[in-house]
């Protein structure tokens, strides 16, 4: 009814914020947004910090992935370094192969089986230092590698100087040096060292970069020959080749498209044999610095030989022709 101003809701009531001073500033929607819901609560298995989420992740993770994650979490990098041999079989084989040992480690409470007993007996018989440490300490030392409670630390390899190796070859009746170009597999390096020692070489030269180094794998593959023949590290392999040529060496590079077969070569003075990688072969500059490129005849169905095998064949032919 007109004029019925007493009806509830007919007249706007003034709030405390409205008066002679005018309206106050609004909240800009902050209050409204704060009162809105954030949606349904996520399931427990979808919340990263809930134990149900962790259980689901553990169930879907493969054992291989778990080992990688555990190893990386301990040290930031998986596996042991190049001067470590870990695991019961590798450690026993390394000892029997005559690898130099700086220190042997065994974890406290490690299960005694036949391999571990042999390892302990070998170290005791040969007076090798054996330290007992906690499993956690051995994990830390080996970078989280799967060590099975035992590990060997090898001493840092002392490389010879290329000048000394070339000088020894000049003084020998049948001077022979082997150089490796871009051979990155330490097992190939070890195999070349073994062949070089077998055929009377005075040393092996490797580049400082893009080359395998004297790791535990190289030591093992050399079957102890690395202790009898020096390995020199060259800052610049091409410079060594140039120097050797000036000293009277014949530089023989192995290449599939070589001018002559290795078996046809004859030599009057010292020889430096250069072996390239299985995939890349010899680099361009190394080829240019060779006196002659020689090939090993193989079946057309085989693209190339393993670097260690090729070096062994070439060294045999050089020794036979002399």
Image (cartoon, rainbow, N blue to C red):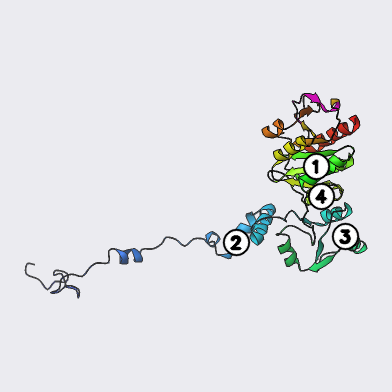
Secondary structure under badge 2? helix
Residue under label 2:
54
157 in the magenta segment: no
Q: Position of residue 219 (x, y in %)?
A: 81, 50
Q: Say which of 199 and 134 sits in front.
A: 199
User: Splitting the image into 4 quarters, where does residue 321 fall?
Assistant: top right
**Alpha carbon separation for disc pair 1 and 2:** 61 Å
**Dividing the image into 4 quarters, which one contains the N terminus?**
bottom left
Sequence-wise, which precedes: disc 4 or disc 2? 2
Q: CA distance from mark 4 to mark 2?
A: 43 Å
Disc number placed over residue 186 in the picture, else none: none
Label 1 sits on a secondary structure element that is helix
Circle 4 is placed at which residue position?
219
Location of residue 270 (image quadrant): top right
Could one spot residue 127 in this view of the protein? yes
Callout 1 touching callout 3 (CB < 8 Å): no
Q: Position of residue 71 (x, y in %)?
A: 68, 58
Crowd class of label 3 (few under 14; some 14 to 19; many from 20; radius 10 Å)? many
Please name the residue that numbered disc 1 is placed on: 166
Is residue 280 positioned above or below 211 on the image? above
The image shows residue 176 at horizontal and vertical percentages of: 84, 38
The span shown in magenta is 254-263
Image point (55%, 60%), residue name: 45
Identity of the residue drawn at 79% across and 58% down: 155
**Mark 1 touches mark 2? (CB < 8 Å):** no
Front in this rendered view, residue 299 or 266: 266
Residue labelled with disc 3: 119
Which of the two discs, 3 and 4, sits closer to the camera?
4
Between the C-alphas of marks 1 and 3, the distance is 39 Å
Front: mark 1 or 4: 1
């Amino acid at each position: 009814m007109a004029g019925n101003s007493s009806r509830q809701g007919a007249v706007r009531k003034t709030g405390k914020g409205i008066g002679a001073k005018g309206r106050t500033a609004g909240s800009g929607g902050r209050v409204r947004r704060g009162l809105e819901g954030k949606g349904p609560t996520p399931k427990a298995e979808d919340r990263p910090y809930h134990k149900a989420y962790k259980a689901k992740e553990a169930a879907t993770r493969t054992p291989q992935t778990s080992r990688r994650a555990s190893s990386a979490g301990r040290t930031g990098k998986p596996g042991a370094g190049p001067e470590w041999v870990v695991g019961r079989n590798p450690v026993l084989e390394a000892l029997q192969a005559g690898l130099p040992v700086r220190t042997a480690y065994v974890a406290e409470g490690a299960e005694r089986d036949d391999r571990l007993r042999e390892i302990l007996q070998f170290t005791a018989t040969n007076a090798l230092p054996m330290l007992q440490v906690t499993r956690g300490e051995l994990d830390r030392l080996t970078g989280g590698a799967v060590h099975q409670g035992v590990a060997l630390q090898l001493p840092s390899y002392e490389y010879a100087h290329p000048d000394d190796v070339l000088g020894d070859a000049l003084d020998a009746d049948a001077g022979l040096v082997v150089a490796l170009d871009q051979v990155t597999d330490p097992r190939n390096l070890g195999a070349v060292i073994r062949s070089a020692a077998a055929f009377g070489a005075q040393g092996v030269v490797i580049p400082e970069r893009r080359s395998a180094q004297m790791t535990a794998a190289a030591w093992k593959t050399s079957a102890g020959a690395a202790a009898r023949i020096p390995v020199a590290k060259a800052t610049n392999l091409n410079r060594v080749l140039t120097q050797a040529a000036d000293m009277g060496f014949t530089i023989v590079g192995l290449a599939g498209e070589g001018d002559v077969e290795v078996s046809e070569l004859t030599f009057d003075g010292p020889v430096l044999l250069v072996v390239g990688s299985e995939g890349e072969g010899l680099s361009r500059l190394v080829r240019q610095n060779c006196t002659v490129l020689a090939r090993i005849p193989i079946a057309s169905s085989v693209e190339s030989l393993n670097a260690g095998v090729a070096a062994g064949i070439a060294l045999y032919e050089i020794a036979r022709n002399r």
